Image (spheres, grey):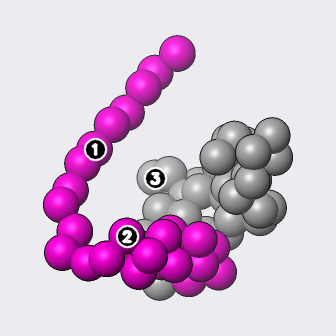
Amino acid sequence: MTRVEAGVEVDAAPEAVWRVLLAFDDYPDWNPLIRRVDGRAEADRRLRVLLTQRGLPRRSSRRP
């Protein structure tokens, strides 16, 4: 399985960062590869993510 990791330091309070990360409807505004995220970020729940890769739609499912 392929694994991709990235990191960045954010100069903001953890609560502010989580607010942005959990605002799934806003993802397409700041990440052009993500078209939509459906689901809730809760343990044992899945998130459905619609991505655009090389101009083609791609679906993914992830656990928070």
Q: Quick check: 58 above or below 4? A: below
Secondary structure found at label 2: helix
Mark 2 highlights which residue?
Answer: 14
Residue at the far top in the pictured view = 1
Mark 1 highlights which residue?
Answer: 6
Image depth: mark 3 or mark 2 in front:
2
Q: Is residue 22 magenta?
A: yes
Over which residues does the magenta segment extend? 1-28
Residue in view at x 64 percent, y 46 percent: 64
Q: Are marks 1 and 2 in contact (CB under 8 Å)?
A: no
Q: Is residue 52 magenta?
A: no
Q: Quick check: 38 above or below 45? A: below
Mark 3 highlights which residue?
Answer: 54
Horizontal placement of 41 versus 27: left or right? right
User: Which residue type carries mark 2?
Assistant: Pro
Q: Are marks 3 and 2 in contact (CB under 8 Å)?
A: no
